[in-house]
Image (cartoon, rainbow, N blue to C red):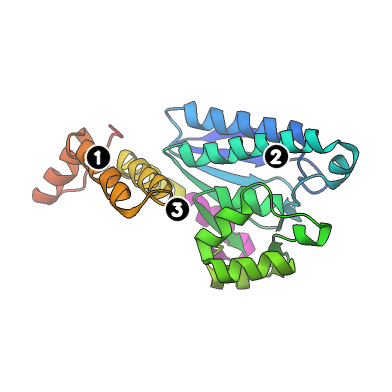
Amino acid sequence: MVEFQKEGAIGYILLNRPPANSYDRAFVEALGEAVGRAAADPEVKVVVVRSALERFFSGGADVKAFSENPPDANMAMVRRAHEVLNGIAAVPKIFIAEIAGHALGGGLEIALACDLRFGAQGEYRLGLPEVTLGLLPGTGGTQRLPRLIGAGKALELMVTGQTLTPEEAFRLGILNRLYPREKLAEETRAFAEALARGATLAIGHIKRAVHQGLSLPLEEGLRLERELVDELFHSEDGQEGVWAFLEKRPPSFRGR
């Protein structure tokens, strides 16, 4: 259902549960295992989450499974999904969602948990339509989407269940980049490889400062920022970057 693959410094988490990558508890567990493998592999510097299916990134939670399970079992899956998706934010590596098909409900919530979202042009939709089932986006959507695009527009999308074209999602800032379908994988890989060659220790610290800082009052967020930049001042990469600049040469970062 979920596979972890590695190509050089790029890790790939491949969603592969036909027909729509709809997820149940087993899928969530498999996703958690893949995230853990990506986090633990020191050779992996950037992680791309993509789909093996042509039409779907993910259609979200398996509604049939929801209907067959008692509410307590469904809530257990929701809690586990929260743990897995929150875990992505805790990994000091950039996660990129590569989207070329429908990303709906929990499928979009997987993408929202990633740090960046790159999309393909095409005739698919993105959105959080859970309200049409009498539910709410329960695996992070009510919290992550407003933080990304602002409360007003996010609330409108969630209470109406409206879905978006890739172009509309790009204009709103849900997608960071939008490419022709035939270029998406190539461009995503090129971006990931450039990050992997860069100051990965600093990149991980930036990710931590942003994700943790958003949940803190400003002064505490600034305190965290000071602590992290102090660590970088004392790091090999921090010293290398400064000396490379002064010596007018490209830096050679080692991630430490």
Q: What's the distance in space between the residues labelled 2 and 1, CA to CA?
A: 34 Å
Discs 1, 3 touching: Cβ within 8 Å: no
Q: Position of residue 68 (x, y in %)?
A: 90, 38
Decide whether residue 122 is among the magenta residues.
no
The region drawn magenta spans: 177-191
Which amino acid type is shown beneath numbered disc 1? Glu
Q: Position of residue 247 (x, y in %)?
A: 9, 48
**Residue 127 located left or right of residue 212:** right
Give the number of the disc on residue 227. 1
Which amino acid type is shown beneath numbered disc 3? Phe
Decide whether residue 190 is among the magenta residues.
yes
**Residue 123 located left or right of residue 31:** right
- Disc 1 packing (10 Å; few <14; some 14–19; many ≥20): few
Q: Main secondary structure of the magenta part?
A: helix
Tell me if residue 255 can be seen: yes
Give the number of the disc on residue 78. 2
Which amino acid type is shown beneath numbered disc 2? Val
First reached walking from the N terminus: tag 1 or tag 3: 3
Q: What's the distance in space between the residues labelled 2 and 3, CA to CA?
A: 32 Å
**Residue 162 located left or right of residue 37:** right
Image quadrant in which the C terminus is located: top left
Tag 3 secondary structure: helix
Q: What's the distance in space between the residues labelled 1 and 3, CA to CA?
A: 28 Å
Query: Residue at label 3?
Result: 191
Q: Quadrant of residue 168?
A: bottom right
Tag 1 secondary structure: helix
